[in-house]
Amino acid sequence: MLQATILLLIVSIWFPGATRIGGTDGTLSFMLALFCATVSVTTYGEMARRLQRTEATLVASVLATSALIIVFSLMSMLYTDNPIRTLRTVFAHIFGFAIIPAVAAISTRQKGSEAVDRIVMAMLIMSVVTSCLVTVGIGGAKFADRAEGYFKQSNQLGIALSASLPLLAAKLIAFRRQPILRLVLMGCLVALLLGLVKSGSKTNFVLGVAGLGSFFGLYSVYLSIRKRGSVAVIAGTVLAPIILEASLLALEHLNPRAYGLLSLQASGGEAHSVVSRERLWAMSIDLGLAHPFLGVGAGQPIGDIAPHSHNLFIEYFRTLGVPGLALITIMFLLVTSYLVIGVLRTLKAVGDDTSESATSTNVMVLGTSVSVWNYLVANQMSDSFGPSTSPFFWLPLALLMFYRANQRLPQAKRAEKTTRYTGAVWPAYER
């Protein structure tokens, strides 16, 4: 039941506009998240005592920080202009309590590793489906200069796709011995890039392409350290500028407006969107300084100008004051430190990680790390950790924790399929 619910949740987060109940986008997603949180947290409580120290500390710290943000957000109902809007922040962090324990609980069951793979594949399938709908302009995904897909804003679609690109690239590498499947995934990668172009989000287009380049760059370093895949490294070095140029040409022909604005910024000019964001940030900082201890209230819009501050840190400072800024900064630093350490250790580790299963796990660590990073960077210019996109942070983070823990398994255990029964400890977390 839990696995089916998390898969339905993944489907629903790609269609927040189509899963509304009572006129509120993403209501069905939130109801599924509440169910996942209720079921998985009870299962996770017993297992948490057996977690390895690093993952246990991260889970406890991140979710405790989220819990404090939820408490402060609910308290802000007492003084804010629009109490219902505070739920925007609450919903975004509830997804963390749903997804992280759910992924951990699912992985403890019989064939848990295969179940986690299904979660990854569901995420990738939905990203490709959404990209194809946007590209051909079907239904709510109809393209008109800036395509929002089934999200409320085109930037939200851009964030979702830019966070999914590294996951797809990692799976592409992981299936290196299956040429037909790799060919299919190559086509899916092109589809995601086209969807990103159609979204018209300049920031997320740049971030998506840069994230893709970062992943392949890290993989090249990974191969070089192990003195393997020299042909692949050379081919990647040659193909990288070609792919970049092809992406820019696609943007120029399929979305001239976005290309023109991107060219203007690259040449030192000031695009209207950048100027408006700078003014929005200045106004938001002034509001935060005017209410430094409590903020104006979680989720509150900036008058009739914008629904949020388009910057993660400024948004929390404006809405929840210094406490909100401190909490979101702590979460950012915890997650960033974890993924940076994970990437460095993956690149440097040369012990027993030459097997096929170890390589696949290491590649997924690199992919999920870049995915989490893409989301965090995107929220410095776009969605400010809104409920429509927050699952695209929590899912890659939960997957990163799973693959990081899997790295610590001995080679023989990592290679064999997970066939533990329900209630068994997550094998990667055994002491």
Image (cartoon, grey):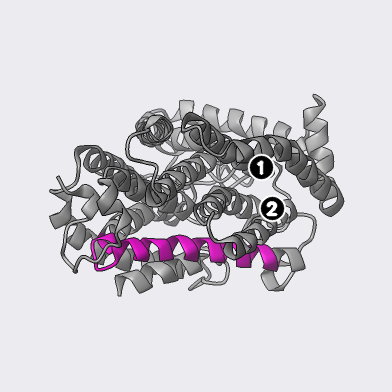
Q: Nearer the viewer, residue 11 or 381?
A: 11
Q: Nearer the viewer, residue 143 or 306?
A: 143
Q: Position of residue 337 (x, y in %)?
A: 38, 30
- Asked if residue 431 lies left or right of residue 343, the reply is left
Q: Residue at x 80, y 24 (%)?
A: 268
Which residues make up the magenta segment?
105-133
Around disc 1, counting alpha carbons within 10 Å, would you say few (fewer than 14), some (14 to 19), or many (20 or more)?
Answer: many
Question: Which quarter of the rendering shows the C terminus?
Answer: top left
| Total numbered badges shown on the rendered structure | 2
Which residue is labeled 1 in the image?
209
Q: Quadrant of residue 349?
A: top left
Residue 270 visible here: no
283 falls in the magenta region: no
Q: Quadrant of residue 405?
A: top left
Q: Residue at x 63, y 64 (%)?
A: 184
Q: Position of residue 273 (x, y in %)?
A: 73, 38
Q: Position of residue 344 (x, y in %)?
A: 41, 30
SS of the residue at dot 1?
helix
Residue type at mark 2?
Leu
Q: Residue at x 18, y 61 (%)?
A: 42
Using the image, determine if residue 25 lies above or below residue 68: below
The answer to whether the residues at label 2 and label 1 have Cβ atoms under 8 Å apart is: yes
Q: Position of residue 41 (x, y in %)?
A: 23, 59
